[in-house]
Image: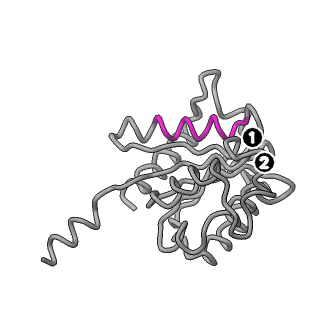
């Protein structure tokens, strides 16, 4: 029986990549798509949830225990997810407020408690959202979301993606590949 439990623990259920901004045409979503393609090349399936998909009125319709039909679809996806990859852009020295509001709207503790996550920061500046990833790590710990130790920060994102939305700089590709491999094994 013990061996069966250990095997069941290794079964991959659902991975969701969260593009953590509601900004149209963002590099965040491009990077989320890149990671999804890289995971698929390794035979690992994932879905993307872009915060663009949030209902327009979710701040008034889905916080504090209320639930619209539109947000319930997203909530069900979050509940079904066992591993998350958060792609988090820098907004004013931290992460987007829409990401915190999204976390607040999700059912607690069922949505994230005891699940796993990898964090990927990006910015147009030179630090790759180091501070925002630190802030989000603290929130993740509070909601008992287990954060993978390797957190990647990609600065100057507009110079890192080619016209097809692929990372192409040798060091960035090497570190992102390392994070992807660790994420699959996590």
Residue 130 seen from this side: no
Q: Residue at x 44, y 55 (%)?
A: 183
Asked whether the residues under the numbered discs 1 and 2 touch, taking CB atoms below 8 Å apart as contact, a structural biologist would say yes
Q: Label 2: few (<14), some or many (≥20) within 10 Å?
A: few
Determine the secondary structure under disc 1. loop
Quarter occupied by the C terminus: bottom left
Q: In which image quadrant can residue 2 be found?
A: bottom left
Residue 96 seen from this side: yes
Q: Could you say which is closer to the camera, residue 124 or residue 111?
A: 111
Q: Which residues are magenta?
A: 26-37
The residue under label 2 is: 126
Considering only vertical position in the picture, is 25 above or below 20? above
Q: Label 1: few (<14), some or many (≥20) within 10 Å?
A: some
Display colour scheme:
one colour
The residue under label 1 is: 156
How many numbered dots are placed on residues in this image?
2
């Amino acid at each position: 029986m013990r061996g069966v439990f250990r095997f069941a623990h290794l079964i991959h259920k659902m991975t969701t990549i969260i593009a953590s901004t509601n900004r149209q045409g963002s590099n965040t979503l491009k990077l989320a798509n890149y990671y999804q393609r890289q995971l698929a090349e390794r035979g690992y399936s994932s879905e993307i949830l872009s915060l663009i998909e949030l209902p327009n009125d979710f701040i008034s319709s889905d916080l504090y225990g209320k639930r619209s039909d539109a947000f319930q679809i997203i909530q069900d996806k979050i509940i079904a997810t066992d591993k998350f990859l958060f792609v988090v852009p820098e907004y004013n020295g931290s992460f987007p407020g829409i990401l915190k509001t999204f976390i607040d709207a999700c059912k607690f503790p069922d949505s994230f408690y005891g699940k796993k996550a990898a964090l990927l920061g990006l910015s147009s500046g030179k630090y790759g959202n180091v501070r925002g990833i630190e802030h989000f790590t603290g929130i993740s710990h509070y909601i008992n979301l287990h954060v993978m130790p390797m957190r990647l920060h990609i600065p100057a994102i507009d110079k890192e993606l080619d016209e097809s939305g692929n990372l192409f700089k040798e060091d960035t590709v090497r570190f992102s590949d390392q994070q992807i491999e660790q994420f699959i094994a996590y």
